[in-house]
Amino acid sequence: MSAQKTRSWYVEKAFTLLIWMFLIGACILILVPLVFMFTASAMPARHILRLPYPWIPEGFYWPNFWSGLRGPEGTFIFIRNALNSLIVAGTVSFFTVILSSLTGYGLAKFQFRGRTLVFMLIMATMMIPFEAIMIPLYMVAMRMGLQDTYAGLILPFLANAFGVFLMRQYLITFPDEILDAARIDGASEPRIFARIVLPSSGPAIATLAILAFRSQWDSLLWPLLVIQSDEMKTIPLYITKFMAETHSDEGIMMAVAVMASIPMIVLFLTLSKYFVNTEGLTSGAKG
Amino acid sequence: MFVIPSLILFSAFSFFPIMNAFYESFFNRNLLSLRPPRFVGWDNYTYLFRSKDFWLSVQNTLIFTLGTFLPLLVFSLILAVFIMSISRFRRFFQMAFYSPAVLSSVVAALIWLLIFDPRGLANQGMNALLGTAGINYNWLSTTGMLRLSTIIVYFWKYIGYFTVIFVSGIGSIPDTLGEAALIDGANRWTLFWHVTFPLLKPTTMLVSIMTMIQCLKTFSTQYMFTSAGAPTRPINVITLNIYNTAIKDYRIGRATAMSILLFVVMFVFTWLQLRVSRTEDVSYT
């Protein structure tokens, strides 16, 4: 009896050990490319190409970052492009939050004719993938004179069906008593929205804002279509152009990669709990 | 009142373009030509269905989608189950696995371009693993390897994301169920196969459809690899083909027809996703 017990205890321990080894192995494999990016950004190109790869940089090689900032033409266009990315991602994420919560609030808390129809229409746009309408959208943008402008980069992404859905689901559980109490106290509807509804939807707003910011920071296809001039380029476009023009210096390329990732890494380390909001993803279309 | 601004934006940037897309796909509009576009009926579609190039990109997209989706599903499920079966460092492992998703896809492609370099880490790693010396695995030049490379990049970037979704799926299963099964004499494997996995079915469905939708619209990795000099044909996926047809060949009508076909396929998947997420709630009774 006791012998059997110890045997199953050993099996259990061996099993746990295997699981740990698997997890640690997977962890190392997944982190290797990231470590490569950081270490290579601190090495001159001739060190990166050494065989085998020297994992520890001999000191920090600043010229990589300096050349990355200067750009191939020495115009420091990277800074302008990074600003563009910040402007576009920031604006889109700000207005997405405002518009989605307004619409979500309207759909969750007001009875009006055609409410279900409006909701269904908005949900239907979730079934239209951006990649399928980009060419017609591009024609629309050209006709509106939006090419090479911030408006061209920003406008198509302001109305976010997933955002509306998320905010509606979040606000539908918001207690009506609080809203009614505020109305009885004589608060106007916009005031109720700005002072009561918005401040109490913090987590949903944070999730949505980060989602919108990240997708814009990452966006390559749409800027490739609408942007022509170097001044209006965003970071992904800068990287593609940089790569095409100077695909010789690995150190500089990794330095640019690091600089392009810093804002996201900072966001991730500070607000990681809003990065994957599985509730928003899996909470179905209830109600 | 509250919904009007959104409705206007939705109309201008979602409804109008998709209607317009159906319309444009029947014309032979050329981006540079000054002649007014001529109505060509189904010509764009029949052209596409006869075009080898189009079918090649359908094939590429399917290979990429299946090749990415199956490993992603299996491994993210395994990782999630393993994470939930240890008692410490759960959060650390989740963060570590998720970290590649923080990078933008352009940066991810850039890193892997250097790793897949003939002198890069991929060859060094493979040679060390197989005990060979100095073999070049042609990550970025032969058809099969190039396809595999794009799949690896995508797998690496999204494995953590789906692991985290599975972890929260497993986390939402009440502990009492597992305990009851253990008291009844179930071992870990039977516990997983007969209790955890069936209860995860909705999450699995959701993850599968989401991955497939993501994979069908892959663009950045393929774009980066081809503009770094890799051959286009093996990884000319639908979105890349649409982009090149419209921007390099100026054939708007043809590109739009391709978009519509992509739209129809993805519409079905998205509809499925919404259906599945609606039936997401499992009752544990």
Image (spheres, grey):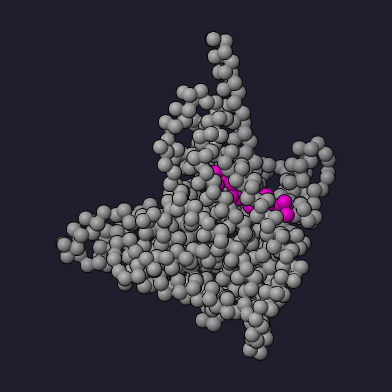
| Residue B176 position (above or below residue A100) | above
Magenta region, main secondary structure: helix
Quarter-of-image position of residue A32: top right
Quarter of the image with the C terminus of chain A is bottom left
| Residue B151 position (above or below residue B91) | below
Residue B15 location, x and y as percent? 49, 73
Q: Residue at x 48, y 66 (%)?
A: A125
Front residue of A81/A177: it is A177
Quarter of the image with the N terminus of chain A is top right
Q: Residue at x 55, y 66 (%)?
A: A130
Front residue of A47/B245: it is B245
Quarter-of-image position of residue A75: bottom right
| Residue B143 position (above or below residue B131) | below
Q: Residue at x 23, y 59 (%)?
A: A179
Q: How many marks?
A: 0
Q: Is residue B150 magenta?
A: yes
Residue B252 location, x and y as percent? 64, 78
Q: Is residue B251 visible?
A: no
- The reply, left or right, for residue B252 in relation to residue A169 is right
Q: Residue furthest bottom?
A: B35
Front residue of B1/A247: it is B1
Write the start and end of the magenta stretch as one range: B147-163
Q: Residue at x 73, y 43 (%)?
A: A53
Quarter-of-image position of residue A170: bottom left
Residue A175 location, x and y as percent? 26, 54
